[in-house]
Amino acid sequence: MAVGIAISKSEDVHYNGKITWFVLLSSIIAATGGIIFGYDTGVTGGVTSMDPFLSKFFPEVYKKMKGDVKISNYCKFDSQLLTTFTSSLYIAGLIASFFASPVTRALGRRASILIGGVSFLSGATLGGTAHNVYMLIFGRILLGIGVGFTNQSVPLYLSEMAPPKFRGAFNIGFQLCVGIGCNTAYLLNYGTQKIKAGWGWRISLAMAAVPALVLTVGAIFMPETPNSLMQHGHDQEKARRLLQKIRGTDDVQAEFNDLITAREASRTIKHPFKKILERKYRPQLVMSIAIPFFQQVTGINVIAFYAPILFRTIGSGVSASLMSSVVIGLVGMSMTILSMVIVDKVGRRVLFHIGGISMFIPQMMIGGIMAAKLKDQGALSQGYSLSLLVLICIYTSGFGLSWGPLGWLVPSEIFPLEIRSAAQSINVGVGFLFIFIVAQTFLVMLCHFKATIFFFFGAWVALMTVFVYFLLPETKDVPIEKMDKIWKNHWFWKRFVDDAQEYEDNKIMGI
């Protein structure tokens, strides 16, 4: 049984064009949306490991960590209020992503990016000046609205602006910026926790305003994508001129014809969320749910949110735990750069498979070491702590190569224009839902599951690798407006597409 997909050369449609400075600069500004998402993800775990922050906003956690010598290593940070601080952003992002869909569809990708930047800027300001936990959490909600809008629109913007044969590299720029944001936060946390006066956490939270300001101002000057201009019924000649400008050539007729076809299909759709439930869109609907779900149950956000807390659990000091996070973040970012370089050469499926294996084995070994060596009291030896750091780095490298960047790339390129904004909202919303669930439950799970939590996430990694092998076709070198062919040629999904097409044909013929 064939599980992959092969697109014959005779079916390929090659668009003319090159990477121009215009499209490169526009994409770099848009990808800054990844920096704000990554910065917030990275800064959270750092500030929640700082004693002044805990003593001010979460005194019960601080007292339990400092005063209760009998409490299990795995339960020191178990606090629903503390996890609410982390996860409130993501439930806000979940809700905001569905409001972002009609905005992105009606006003364009740039409008959603601008709204997201302004909201995130407001949230960063409020968080940095917070005097009580309610201000802190309200600031997190504003941050969540910001990332809800930007995560919904930025990947679409990058995929639509990029030349098709470099689409993977351009889109992975978003995940690279997530890594840059995470590492910036890790390094800043490492520095600010050393401020003796105890207000370093304010700098960490407030500095999120810097990339948000760059994104907000930059969005004012960014062009809209040709796909979006066509969808909104703008003058075709205006869209053609923009396409010629971003492709660096006057010969864009093949791509422009596909945009016209996509626009006509999009105009017939009044309710995209209802449309995506139709049988012919079943592959896209499944992927818009499965890919973000699997991306979150890799366990990566356990590392991103709670790496400093995790290393304090196994006995490291604050400085050592934060520096461990820096090392982990740099490893993941370097592998994302490698993914950006090779994704359009080797394809998406190969990287998914390599990444799955690279994540599964370390998780099993981490769980085994912690189960055997870390008891409820005491700490791991320096040798075992170093071994865990190495294993987490291997795991992170696998994620940085595969599910990190590809979890954003693949959904952004497989949806047809008529359901693209709705499908991307489902993709982002599902992602935020499970980030929220993982963030809200991890500390409880760590307290009850202890070391076996790594076996739990490892099992999901094994399942998602099998899912990709059998059900996700290759999208490399397929133009974004011609992506329907991958489902028609797939051994499993073609039955849904063919049945739906036959039904529509019969309906037209009155059969």
Image (cartoon, helix red, strand yellow):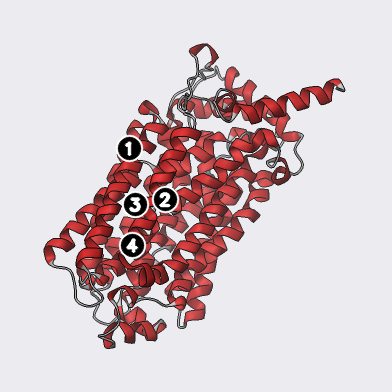
> Mark 4 belongs to which amino acid?
Thr
Q: Which residue is the site of mark 1?
A: 354
> Is residue 163 toward the left or the right of residue 318 in the image?
right
* Between marks 1 and 3 in the image, the one whose residue lies nearer the viewer: 1
- Determine the CA span between mark 2 and mark 4: 13 Å
> Mark 3 belongs to which amino acid?
Ile
> Mark 2 belongs to which amino acid?
Trp
Residue 339 occupies quadrant: top left
Q: Dot 4: within a 10 Å radius of its alpha carbon, few (fewer than 14), some, or many (20 or more) residues?
A: some
Q: What is the total number of numbered labels drawn onto the structure image?
A: 4
Q: Dot 1: within a 10 Å radius of its alpha carbon, few (fewer than 14), some, or many (20 or more) residues?
A: some
Q: Nearer the viewer, residue 133 or 316?
A: 316
- Determine the CA span between mark 3 and mark 2: 27 Å
**Residue 494 location (% of width, % of height):** 60, 26
Q: Tell me which label, 3 or 2, sits earlier in the chain.
A: 3
- Determine the CA span between mark 3 and mark 4: 31 Å
Q: Tell me which label, 3 or 4, sits earlier in the chain.
A: 3
**Residue 214 location (% of width, % of height):** 45, 54
Q: Which residue is the site of mark 3?
A: 180
Q: Tell me which label, 2 or 4, sits earlier in the chain.
A: 4
Q: Nearer the viewer, residue 280 or 402?
A: 280
Residue 452 marker: 4
- The answer to whether residue 385 of the structure is visible from this angle is yes
